[in-house]
């Protein structure tokens, strides 16, 4: 049995994977907040959070890390609504000298920071903005296993996504 330090990381974006957008507004189901959690009046889109995500994410054999512009608000507003505990939060770098190169490569602004944070540990990155440029860069710069899993932002994480994540993670161990 491997301890938590050895478990793969799962870098989780919020807008897109957990909060669907970009589809027809009438097609996006809404869900009630768990008792005591922050109300949707603060962030109207929070009502799109399906509380099932909490259970399904917690069942994955990995350590979930928020990798989102929600930053600390992910723990404040998102986690309680879906029944997740407080999770580690990625902090993002200030603009830097590599930004021009990243733009030329078409690299996502999160990619370098995630690879640095993983520091060779296996990781999954779940995001709606992953492209081939990110896959190529990660393959060249990360020495462990990595799965860059793009989610359709109109639907958010689906059964098929969870299946893919779960089987990749279980194959690792
Ligand atoms: Mg997103």
Image: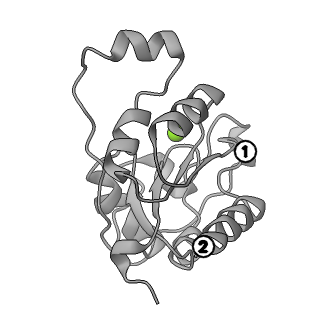
Task: Assess disc 1: are there few (<14), some (14-19) or many (≥20) residues with their C-alpha within 10 Å of its C-alpha.
Answer: few
Label at residue 66? none
Where is residue 13 shown, x and y percent of the image? 48, 48
Report which residue position mark 1 lands on: 26
Which numbered disc, 2 or 1, marks the residue closer to the eye?
2
On the image, the x and y values in percent for residue 46 come to 47, 54
Which residue is the site of mark 2? Answer: 52
Q: How is the image coloured?
A: one colour
Q: Residues within 10 Å of mark 2 (few under 14, many from 20)?
A: few
Question: Relative to 135, does residue 76 appear above or below in the rendering?
Answer: below
The answer to whether residue 9 is left or right of residue 106 is: left
Residue 30 horizontal/vertical position (percent): 61, 58
Secondary structure of the residue carrying numbered label 1? helix
Total count of labels: 2
Q: What kind of element bears circle 2? A: helix
Q: Which of 132 and 142 is in front in this view?
A: 142
Seen in the picture, residue 82 relative to 108 is either above or below; the reply is below
User: Observer-nearest residue: 72 or 95?
Assistant: 95
Whether residue 4 appears in this view of the structure is: yes
């Amino acid at each position: 049995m491997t301890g938590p330090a050895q478990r793969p990381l799962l870098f989780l974006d919020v807008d897109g994977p957990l909060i669907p957008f970009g589809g027809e507004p009438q097609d996006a189901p809404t869900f009630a907040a768990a008792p005591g959690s922050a109300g949707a009046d603060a962030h109207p889109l929070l009502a799109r959070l399906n509380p099932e995500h909490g259970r399904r994410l917690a069942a994955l054999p990995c350590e979930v890390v928020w990798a989102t512009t929600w930053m600390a608000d992910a723990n404040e507003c998102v986690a309680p609504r879906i029944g997740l505990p407080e999770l580690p939060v990625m902090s993002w770098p200030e603009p830097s000298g590599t930004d021009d190169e990243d733009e030329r490569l078409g690299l996502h602004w999160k990619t370098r920071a995630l690879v640095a944070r993983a520091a060779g540990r296996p990781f999954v990155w779940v995001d709606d903005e992953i492209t081939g440029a990110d896959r190529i860069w990660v393959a060249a710069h990360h020495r462990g296993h990595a799965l860059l899993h793009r989610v359709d932002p109109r639907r958010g994480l689906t059964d098929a996504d969870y299946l893919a994540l779960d089987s990749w993670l279980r194959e690792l161990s």
